[in-house]
Amino acid sequence: MVCPEIYKIVSTKPEESPEGIEEVLVQEDKEHEIVLYNDDVNTFDHVIRCLIKICEHTYMQAEQCAYLVHFTGKCVVKTGSLEDLVPRCTALLEEGLSAEII
């Protein structure tokens, strides 16, 4: 679920502009991500219930994220603005899960 950074290419040919503007790669605003980490405490069922309730995942999405966390150690479970992610990450932490916003 990791989303690549979004870029926009701005280009004008020198003959179209007296200033001779070259092609420029401009980075668009990058969304933030909640990363969920593996632990030895929480059950699959608890993690799945939390992802459904807090991150609004479907059961299948939540189950896949739980398996990714278990086997790889971490998984991006939600992307968006800080205003949206901070309360969700706080709720995950209050449920005893290990998560952070990056």
Image (cartoon, helix red, strand yellow):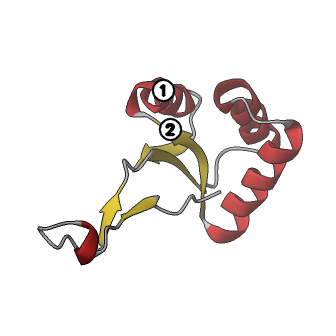
Q: Nearer the viewer, residue 43 or 79?
A: 79
The amino acid at mark 1 is: Asp
- The answer to whether residue 21 is above or below residue 93 is below
Tell whether label 1 touches label 2 (CB within 8 Å).
yes
Residue 12 as seen in the image, left or right of residue 75: left
For the residue carrying disc 2, how many other residues have a C-alpha within 10 Å: few (<14), some (14-19), or many (20+)?
few
Q: Position of residue 84 (x, y in %)?
A: 48, 26
Question: What is the total number of numbered labels drawn onto the structure image?
Answer: 2
Q: Position of residue 23 (x, y in %)?
A: 30, 73
Residue lying farthest to the left in this orientation? 19
Q: Where does the N terminus fall, quadrant-wise?
A: bottom right
For the residues marked 2 and 1, what is the alpha-carbon distance in whole angstroms?
6 Å
Residue lying farthest to the right in this orientation? 60
- The answer to whether residue 24 is above or below residue 39 is below
**Residue at image mark 1:** 84
To which quarter of the image does residue 55 belong? top right
Residue 84 as seen in the image, left or right of residue 38: left
Q: For the residue labelled by badge 2, is the local secondary structure a helix, a strand or a loop?
A: strand
Q: Residue at x 67, y 59 (%)?
A: 69
The amino acid at mark 2 is: Gly
